[in-house]
Amino acid sequence: MASRENPAEQKAAEQIPPPSNRNTKMLEIPVTHSKQRNGQGPNRNTNGGSSETVSEISSRPTRTRLAAPRPAKYPPTAAMSSKRLATLPGTTDRRIDALLTLLAENSTIVISGAKIAKEIGVTRQQVWRWIERLRELGVRVQGHPHTGYHIEKIPDILVPQLLSHRLYGTPFARRIYHFFKIDSTNTVALQLGEQGEPHGAVVLAEEQTAGRGRAGRKWLSEKSAGIHCTVLVRPQISPAHAPLLTLAAGLAARDAAAEELDAVPDIRWPNDILVHGRKFSGILTEMHAEPDRVHYAVIGIGMNINQTKMPPELADFATSLRIETGKTHSRIEILARLLRHLDRYYNLFLAQGAEPILRRFAEVSSYFQGKRVRITTVAETFTGTTSGLEPSGVLRVLRDDGRGVESILSGDVAEAD
Protein backbone atom coordinates (compact mmCIF):
# COMPACT_ATOMS: atom_id res chain seq x y z
CA MET A 1 0.00 0.00 0.00
CA ALA A 2 2.26 2.69 -1.24
CA SER A 3 2.15 6.30 -2.32
CA ARG A 4 3.32 7.50 -5.70
CA GLU A 5 4.50 10.73 -4.05
CA ASN A 6 8.04 11.87 -4.75
CA PRO A 7 9.86 11.73 -1.40
CA ALA A 8 11.87 14.78 -2.40
CA GLU A 9 8.71 16.86 -2.62
CA GLN A 10 7.51 16.22 0.90
CA LYS A 11 9.26 14.81 3.94
CA ALA A 12 8.02 11.36 4.81
CA ALA A 13 6.84 10.48 8.26
CA GLU A 14 9.37 9.03 10.68
CA GLN A 15 10.16 5.43 9.95
CA ILE A 16 9.50 2.72 12.49
CA PRO A 17 12.49 0.37 12.75
CA PRO A 18 11.84 -3.18 11.58
CA PRO A 19 11.27 -5.79 14.25
CA SER A 20 14.21 -7.77 15.47
CA ASN A 21 14.53 -11.40 14.45
CA ARG A 22 15.07 -12.98 17.87
CA ASN A 23 14.25 -16.67 17.52
CA THR A 24 11.30 -16.23 15.22
CA LYS A 25 10.97 -15.90 11.48
CA MET A 26 8.81 -13.42 9.66
CA LEU A 27 6.66 -15.03 7.01
CA GLU A 28 4.03 -13.90 4.60
CA ILE A 29 1.07 -16.11 4.02
CA PRO A 30 -0.44 -18.20 2.48
CA VAL A 31 2.15 -20.73 3.65
CA THR A 32 2.16 -24.39 4.58
CA HIS A 33 5.26 -24.41 6.79
CA SER A 34 7.34 -21.71 8.46
CA LYS A 35 10.79 -22.47 7.10
CA GLN A 36 11.47 -19.29 5.18
CA ARG A 37 10.25 -15.80 4.46
CA ASN A 38 8.10 -15.46 1.38
CA GLY A 39 7.52 -12.58 -1.03
CA GLN A 40 5.34 -9.57 -0.24
CA GLY A 41 1.97 -8.26 -1.10
CA PRO A 42 -0.31 -6.54 -3.60
CA ASN A 43 1.40 -4.25 -6.05
CA ARG A 44 0.71 -1.59 -8.58
CA ASN A 45 -0.68 -4.44 -10.62
CA THR A 46 -2.67 -5.59 -7.63
CA ASN A 47 -4.56 -2.36 -7.42
CA GLY A 48 -5.78 -4.37 -10.38
CA GLY A 49 -4.39 -7.20 -12.47
CA SER A 50 -3.72 -10.77 -11.51
CA SER A 51 -3.41 -12.35 -8.10
CA GLU A 52 -0.10 -13.84 -6.98
CA THR A 53 0.27 -16.33 -4.18
CA VAL A 54 3.36 -16.02 -2.07
CA SER A 55 4.44 -19.36 -0.71
CA GLU A 56 7.44 -21.03 -2.30
CA ILE A 57 7.94 -23.78 0.23
CA SER A 58 6.94 -26.92 -1.61
CA SER A 59 5.47 -27.81 -4.96
CA ARG A 60 2.65 -29.95 -3.56
CA PRO A 61 1.29 -29.69 -0.03
CA THR A 62 -0.05 -32.69 1.79
CA ARG A 63 -3.81 -33.04 1.67
CA THR A 64 -4.46 -34.13 5.21
CA ARG A 65 -7.39 -32.34 6.85
CA LEU A 66 -6.37 -29.69 9.33
CA ALA A 67 -7.84 -29.94 12.79
CA ALA A 68 -9.73 -26.93 14.09
CA PRO A 69 -7.41 -24.62 16.01
CA ARG A 70 -8.06 -24.28 19.71
CA PRO A 71 -10.11 -21.19 20.55
CA ALA A 72 -7.81 -18.43 21.73
CA LYS A 73 -8.33 -17.27 25.29
CA TYR A 74 -7.96 -13.54 25.45
CA PRO A 75 -8.58 -11.34 28.48
CA PRO A 76 -11.67 -9.10 28.47
CA THR A 77 -11.44 -5.92 26.39
CA ALA A 78 -11.10 -3.74 29.47
CA ALA A 79 -8.20 -5.78 30.77
CA MET A 80 -6.51 -5.81 27.38
CA SER A 81 -6.77 -2.05 27.07
CA SER A 82 -5.34 -1.36 30.54
CA LYS A 83 -1.86 -1.39 29.04
CA ARG A 84 -0.92 2.12 27.96
CA LEU A 85 -0.81 2.76 24.24
CA ALA A 86 2.71 2.57 22.86
CA THR A 87 4.45 5.86 22.10
CA LEU A 88 5.19 5.90 18.38
CA PRO A 89 6.70 8.75 16.37
CA GLY A 90 4.19 10.48 14.12
CA THR A 91 0.94 9.29 15.70
CA THR A 92 -1.88 11.81 15.69
CA ASP A 93 -2.01 13.86 18.88
CA ARG A 94 -4.89 12.57 20.99
CA ARG A 95 -5.98 16.16 21.61
CA ILE A 96 -6.42 16.73 17.87
CA ASP A 97 -8.47 13.54 17.89
CA ALA A 98 -10.55 15.01 20.73
CA LEU A 99 -10.95 18.32 18.87
CA LEU A 100 -12.20 16.59 15.73
CA THR A 101 -14.60 14.46 17.74
CA LEU A 102 -15.92 17.44 19.69
CA LEU A 103 -16.59 19.40 16.49
CA ALA A 104 -18.08 16.39 14.68
CA GLU A 105 -20.43 15.48 17.52
CA ASN A 106 -21.62 19.11 17.83
CA SER A 107 -21.76 19.92 14.14
CA THR A 108 -24.97 21.96 14.33
CA ILE A 109 -23.76 24.46 16.95
CA VAL A 110 -20.98 27.00 17.34
CA ILE A 111 -18.50 26.12 20.10
CA SER A 112 -16.39 28.85 21.64
CA GLY A 113 -12.62 28.63 21.51
CA ALA A 114 -12.54 28.85 25.31
CA LYS A 115 -14.85 25.87 25.68
CA ILE A 116 -12.86 23.84 23.17
CA ALA A 117 -9.63 24.69 25.01
CA LYS A 118 -11.12 23.62 28.33
CA GLU A 119 -12.58 20.39 26.94
CA ILE A 120 -9.35 19.14 25.38
CA GLY A 121 -6.88 20.71 27.80
CA VAL A 122 -4.95 23.18 25.64
CA THR A 123 -4.69 26.96 25.25
CA ARG A 124 -6.98 28.97 22.97
CA GLN A 125 -3.95 29.81 20.83
CA GLN A 126 -3.28 26.10 20.38
CA VAL A 127 -6.92 25.57 19.41
CA TRP A 128 -6.52 28.21 16.69
CA ARG A 129 -3.33 26.57 15.37
CA TRP A 130 -4.97 23.15 15.26
CA ILE A 131 -8.06 24.54 13.52
CA GLU A 132 -5.75 25.94 10.85
CA ARG A 133 -4.03 22.56 10.55
CA LEU A 134 -7.38 20.81 10.12
CA ARG A 135 -8.33 23.27 7.39
CA GLU A 136 -5.08 22.46 5.60
CA LEU A 137 -6.12 18.81 5.72
CA GLY A 138 -9.42 19.63 4.07
CA VAL A 139 -11.65 19.73 7.15
CA ARG A 140 -14.20 22.51 6.63
CA VAL A 141 -14.22 24.42 9.91
CA GLN A 142 -16.08 27.73 9.93
CA GLY A 143 -14.91 30.46 12.31
CA HIS A 144 -17.33 33.01 13.79
CA PRO A 145 -15.87 36.20 15.28
CA HIS A 146 -16.41 36.44 19.04
CA THR A 147 -18.44 33.21 19.16
CA GLY A 148 -16.29 30.26 18.10
CA TYR A 149 -16.20 27.48 15.54
CA HIS A 150 -18.45 24.95 13.92
CA ILE A 151 -17.76 22.23 11.40
CA GLU A 152 -19.50 22.60 8.05
CA LYS A 153 -19.20 18.94 7.15
CA ILE A 154 -18.42 16.01 9.41
CA PRO A 155 -14.89 14.96 8.44
CA ASP A 156 -14.22 11.56 6.96
CA ILE A 157 -10.99 11.14 8.93
CA LEU A 158 -10.34 7.82 10.65
CA VAL A 159 -9.29 9.15 14.06
CA PRO A 160 -9.63 6.82 17.05
CA GLN A 161 -12.44 8.51 18.99
CA LEU A 162 -14.71 8.74 15.96
CA LEU A 163 -14.08 5.06 15.19
CA SER A 164 -13.89 3.40 18.59
CA HIS A 165 -17.54 3.74 19.64
CA ARG A 166 -18.54 2.10 16.34
CA LEU A 167 -16.42 -0.91 17.35
CA TYR A 168 -17.77 -1.34 20.87
CA GLY A 169 -17.70 -4.98 21.94
CA THR A 170 -14.82 -5.94 19.63
CA PRO A 171 -11.12 -6.20 20.52
CA PHE A 172 -10.42 -3.46 17.95
CA ALA A 173 -12.18 -0.67 19.85
CA ARG A 174 -9.55 0.52 22.33
CA ARG A 175 -6.08 0.30 20.84
CA ILE A 176 -6.21 2.38 17.66
CA TYR A 177 -3.08 4.11 16.34
CA HIS A 178 -3.77 6.83 13.77
CA PHE A 179 -1.28 8.58 11.49
CA PHE A 180 -1.95 11.35 9.03
CA LYS A 181 1.12 10.11 7.19
CA ILE A 182 3.30 7.04 7.69
CA ASP A 183 5.52 4.74 5.68
CA SER A 184 3.46 1.53 6.03
CA THR A 185 0.79 0.43 8.46
CA ASN A 186 2.09 -3.14 8.28
CA THR A 187 5.58 -1.99 9.28
CA VAL A 188 4.20 -0.19 12.34
CA ALA A 189 2.01 -3.16 13.30
CA LEU A 190 4.95 -5.56 13.05
CA GLN A 191 6.94 -3.33 15.38
CA LEU A 192 4.02 -3.23 17.83
CA GLY A 193 3.78 -7.02 17.72
CA GLU A 194 7.46 -7.34 18.52
CA GLN A 195 7.03 -4.99 21.48
CA GLY A 196 4.25 -7.11 22.99
CA GLU A 197 1.23 -5.07 21.87
CA PRO A 198 -1.98 -6.95 22.79
CA HIS A 199 -4.28 -8.69 20.35
CA GLY A 200 -6.65 -6.32 18.56
CA ALA A 201 -4.44 -3.28 17.96
CA VAL A 202 -5.36 -1.32 14.82
CA VAL A 203 -2.98 0.89 12.82
CA LEU A 204 -4.53 3.44 10.44
CA ALA A 205 -3.07 5.98 8.03
CA GLU A 206 -4.62 8.72 5.94
CA GLU A 207 -1.63 8.41 3.62
CA GLN A 208 1.29 5.99 3.19
CA THR A 209 4.65 6.82 1.65
CA ALA A 210 6.12 3.32 1.48
CA GLY A 211 3.16 0.99 1.69
CA ARG A 212 3.69 -2.36 0.13
CA GLY A 213 1.85 -5.25 -1.36
CA ARG A 214 2.86 -8.79 -2.10
CA ALA A 215 6.29 -9.45 -3.66
CA GLY A 216 7.49 -6.02 -2.52
CA ARG A 217 5.27 -4.23 -5.03
CA LYS A 218 3.56 -0.90 -4.43
CA TRP A 219 0.01 0.00 -3.52
CA LEU A 220 -1.44 3.37 -4.54
CA SER A 221 -2.33 5.36 -1.40
CA GLU A 222 -4.10 8.61 -2.26
CA LYS A 223 -4.47 10.78 0.84
CA SER A 224 -7.75 10.28 2.74
CA ALA A 225 -9.38 8.62 -0.28
CA GLY A 226 -9.16 4.98 0.77
CA ILE A 227 -8.67 2.71 3.76
CA HIS A 228 -5.11 1.83 4.81
CA CYS A 229 -5.49 -0.37 7.86
CA THR A 230 -3.55 -3.11 9.63
CA VAL A 231 -4.77 -5.18 12.56
CA LEU A 232 -2.58 -7.16 14.96
CA VAL A 233 -3.87 -10.58 16.00
CA ARG A 234 -2.44 -13.26 18.26
CA PRO A 235 -4.19 -16.49 17.27
CA GLN A 236 -3.21 -19.69 19.04
CA ILE A 237 -2.75 -21.60 15.78
CA SER A 238 0.02 -23.28 13.84
CA PRO A 239 1.48 -21.62 10.72
CA ALA A 240 -0.29 -24.25 8.60
CA HIS A 241 -3.60 -22.57 9.47
CA ALA A 242 -2.35 -19.03 8.85
CA PRO A 243 -3.42 -18.71 5.17
CA LEU A 244 -7.00 -18.79 6.39
CA LEU A 245 -6.45 -15.44 8.12
CA THR A 246 -6.05 -13.87 4.66
CA LEU A 247 -9.22 -15.56 3.43
CA ALA A 248 -11.13 -14.36 6.50
CA ALA A 249 -9.94 -10.78 5.96
CA GLY A 250 -10.89 -10.95 2.30
CA LEU A 251 -14.38 -12.09 3.22
CA ALA A 252 -14.68 -9.22 5.71
CA ALA A 253 -13.58 -6.65 3.12
CA ARG A 254 -15.91 -8.11 0.52
CA ASP A 255 -18.92 -8.07 2.86
CA ALA A 256 -18.20 -4.51 4.03
CA ALA A 257 -18.06 -3.19 0.48
CA ALA A 258 -21.06 -5.16 -0.76
CA GLU A 259 -23.45 -2.83 1.09
CA GLU A 260 -22.08 0.12 -0.92
CA LEU A 261 -22.30 -1.45 -4.37
CA ASP A 262 -25.10 -2.29 -6.76
CA ALA A 263 -22.97 -5.01 -8.37
CA VAL A 264 -21.96 -8.08 -6.40
CA PRO A 265 -18.23 -8.03 -5.49
CA ASP A 266 -16.08 -11.07 -6.21
CA ILE A 267 -12.95 -12.49 -4.55
CA ARG A 268 -10.04 -13.61 -6.70
CA TRP A 269 -8.08 -16.11 -4.66
CA PRO A 270 -6.38 -15.50 -2.36
CA ASN A 271 -6.80 -11.82 -1.53
CA ASP A 272 -8.12 -9.59 -4.32
CA ILE A 273 -11.60 -8.06 -4.06
CA LEU A 274 -13.12 -7.21 -7.44
CA VAL A 275 -16.14 -5.50 -8.92
CA HIS A 276 -16.84 -5.79 -12.65
CA GLY A 277 -13.52 -7.61 -12.90
CA ARG A 278 -11.45 -4.71 -11.54
CA LYS A 279 -9.72 -4.70 -8.18
CA PHE A 280 -10.61 -2.25 -5.42
CA SER A 281 -9.22 -4.01 -2.33
CA GLY A 282 -6.35 -6.29 -1.35
CA ILE A 283 -4.93 -8.03 1.71
CA LEU A 284 -1.34 -8.50 2.89
CA THR A 285 -0.81 -10.79 5.88
CA GLU A 286 2.58 -11.19 7.58
CA MET A 287 3.49 -13.06 10.73
CA HIS A 288 6.15 -14.02 13.23
CA ALA A 289 6.07 -17.74 13.85
CA GLU A 290 7.95 -20.84 14.83
CA PRO A 291 7.34 -24.16 13.06
CA ASP A 292 4.59 -25.13 15.49
CA ARG A 293 2.97 -21.84 16.48
CA VAL A 294 2.20 -18.29 15.41
CA HIS A 295 3.41 -15.60 17.79
CA TYR A 296 1.43 -12.88 16.08
CA ALA A 297 0.17 -11.90 12.65
CA VAL A 298 -0.58 -8.53 11.08
CA ILE A 299 -3.33 -8.28 8.48
CA GLY A 300 -3.04 -5.29 6.18
CA ILE A 301 -6.17 -4.24 4.29
CA GLY A 302 -6.20 -1.64 1.54
CA MET A 303 -9.44 -0.48 -0.06
CA ASN A 304 -10.04 2.16 -2.74
CA ILE A 305 -13.06 4.17 -1.60
CA ASN A 306 -13.38 7.74 -2.91
CA GLN A 307 -10.75 7.98 -5.65
CA THR A 308 -12.29 9.68 -8.69
CA LYS A 309 -9.86 8.18 -11.19
CA MET A 310 -7.01 5.73 -11.46
CA PRO A 311 -3.60 6.29 -13.07
CA PRO A 312 -3.79 5.44 -16.80
CA GLU A 313 -1.59 2.38 -16.38
CA LEU A 314 -4.02 0.94 -13.80
CA ALA A 315 -7.36 2.09 -15.16
CA ASP A 316 -8.12 -1.22 -16.91
CA PHE A 317 -7.40 -3.25 -13.76
CA ALA A 318 -8.25 -1.08 -10.74
CA THR A 319 -11.27 0.84 -9.53
CA SER A 320 -12.81 2.43 -6.45
CA LEU A 321 -16.24 2.40 -4.88
CA ARG A 322 -16.80 5.98 -6.02
CA ILE A 323 -15.84 5.21 -9.61
CA GLU A 324 -18.30 2.31 -9.59
CA THR A 325 -21.21 4.13 -7.96
CA GLY A 326 -20.68 7.78 -8.87
CA LYS A 327 -21.04 8.89 -5.25
CA THR A 328 -18.87 9.45 -2.22
CA HIS A 329 -18.82 6.92 0.60
CA SER A 330 -18.13 7.18 4.33
CA ARG A 331 -14.73 5.62 4.94
CA ILE A 332 -15.29 5.47 8.67
CA GLU A 333 -18.57 3.57 8.34
CA ILE A 334 -17.06 1.11 5.85
CA LEU A 335 -14.01 0.57 8.06
CA ALA A 336 -16.15 -0.02 11.15
CA ARG A 337 -18.25 -2.52 9.22
CA LEU A 338 -15.12 -4.22 7.86
CA LEU A 339 -13.57 -4.64 11.32
CA ARG A 340 -16.80 -5.99 12.77
CA HIS A 341 -17.00 -8.55 9.95
CA LEU A 342 -13.34 -9.43 10.52
CA ASP A 343 -13.97 -9.99 14.22
CA ARG A 344 -16.86 -12.33 13.34
CA TYR A 345 -14.93 -14.37 10.77
CA TYR A 346 -11.86 -14.52 13.00
CA ASN A 347 -13.86 -15.90 15.91
CA LEU A 348 -15.57 -18.41 13.61
CA PHE A 349 -12.17 -19.59 12.43
CA LEU A 350 -10.80 -19.99 15.95
CA ALA A 351 -13.89 -21.81 17.16
CA GLN A 352 -14.62 -24.08 14.18
CA GLY A 353 -11.49 -24.17 12.06
CA ALA A 354 -11.30 -23.86 8.29
CA GLU A 355 -14.73 -25.21 7.34
CA PRO A 356 -16.92 -22.09 7.80
CA ILE A 357 -14.32 -19.89 6.09
CA LEU A 358 -14.00 -22.22 3.10
CA ARG A 359 -17.77 -22.60 2.88
CA ARG A 360 -18.32 -18.84 2.81
CA PHE A 361 -15.51 -18.37 0.27
CA ALA A 362 -17.22 -20.94 -1.97
CA GLU A 363 -20.47 -18.97 -1.72
CA VAL A 364 -19.05 -15.59 -2.77
CA SER A 365 -16.01 -16.30 -4.99
CA SER A 366 -16.32 -17.22 -8.65
CA TYR A 367 -12.73 -18.44 -8.41
CA PHE A 368 -13.55 -21.23 -5.98
CA GLN A 369 -14.60 -23.84 -8.51
CA GLY A 370 -15.13 -24.09 -12.25
CA LYS A 371 -13.28 -20.88 -13.15
CA ARG A 372 -11.06 -20.89 -16.23
CA VAL A 373 -7.72 -19.46 -15.09
CA ARG A 374 -4.21 -18.84 -16.30
CA ILE A 375 -1.49 -19.63 -13.76
CA THR A 376 1.97 -18.11 -14.10
CA THR A 377 4.76 -19.36 -11.85
CA VAL A 378 8.51 -18.90 -11.92
CA ALA A 379 8.85 -22.15 -13.83
CA GLU A 380 5.87 -22.14 -16.23
CA THR A 381 2.56 -20.75 -17.40
CA PHE A 382 -0.44 -23.01 -17.82
CA THR A 383 -4.21 -22.88 -18.00
CA GLY A 384 -6.81 -24.89 -16.19
CA THR A 385 -10.02 -24.88 -14.21
CA THR A 386 -10.26 -24.16 -10.50
CA SER A 387 -11.24 -27.14 -8.38
CA GLY A 388 -11.85 -25.80 -4.88
CA LEU A 389 -9.46 -25.16 -2.01
CA GLU A 390 -7.37 -27.41 0.18
CA PRO A 391 -8.29 -27.42 3.90
CA SER A 392 -5.25 -25.14 4.32
CA GLY A 393 -6.74 -22.58 1.92
CA VAL A 394 -4.48 -23.45 -1.05
CA LEU A 395 -6.11 -23.23 -4.51
CA ARG A 396 -6.50 -26.42 -6.58
CA VAL A 397 -6.45 -26.21 -10.38
CA LEU A 398 -7.21 -29.00 -12.85
CA ARG A 399 -4.64 -28.51 -15.61
CA ASP A 400 -5.63 -28.46 -19.28
CA ASP A 401 -2.53 -30.45 -20.27
CA GLY A 402 -3.72 -33.65 -18.63
CA ARG A 403 -1.28 -33.56 -15.73
CA GLY A 404 -3.99 -33.64 -13.13
CA VAL A 405 -4.81 -31.30 -10.27
CA GLU A 406 -2.15 -28.79 -9.23
CA SER A 407 -2.09 -27.16 -5.79
CA ILE A 408 -1.09 -23.54 -6.37
CA LEU A 409 1.33 -22.20 -3.81
CA SER A 410 3.15 -19.50 -5.76
CA GLY A 411 2.21 -17.68 -8.96
CA ASP A 412 -0.10 -15.25 -10.66
CA VAL A 413 -3.76 -16.21 -10.92
CA ALA A 414 -5.74 -14.52 -13.69
CA GLU A 415 -8.95 -15.28 -15.52
CA ALA A 416 -8.16 -17.15 -18.74
CA ASP A 417 -9.17 -15.64 -22.07
Image (tube, rainbow, N blue to C red):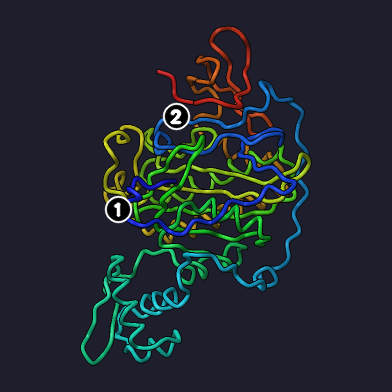
Q: Nearer the viewer, residue 290 or 71?
A: 290
Q: Position of residue 305 (x, y in %)?
A: 37, 51
Report the residue at 67% width, 34% height from top. 36
Residue at screen point 67% across, 73% down: 82
Residue 33, above or below 188: above
Q: Is residue 22 visible?
A: yes
Crowdedness of circle 2 by 10 Å Cα count: few (<14), some, many (20+)?
A: many
Dot 1 alpha-carbon crowd within 10 angstroms: few under 14, some 14 to 19, many 20 or more: few
Q: Earlier in the sequence, mark 1 or mark 2?
A: 1
Q: Tell me where residue 381 appears, x and y as whole percent.
A: 50, 15
- The reply to whether the C-beta atoms of the residues labelled 1 and 2 are less than 8 Å apart is no
Name the residue: 41% across, 62% down.
180
Q: Which residue is mark 1?
A: 9
Position of residue 24 measured from the top left corner of the image (x, y, whole percent): 72, 45
Towards the viewer: 211 or 249: 211
Splitting the image into 4 quarters, where does residue 151 fall?
A: bottom left
Say if 406 sits above or below 263 in the image. above
Identify the disc placed on residue 336.
none
Q: Which residue is mark 2?
A: 50
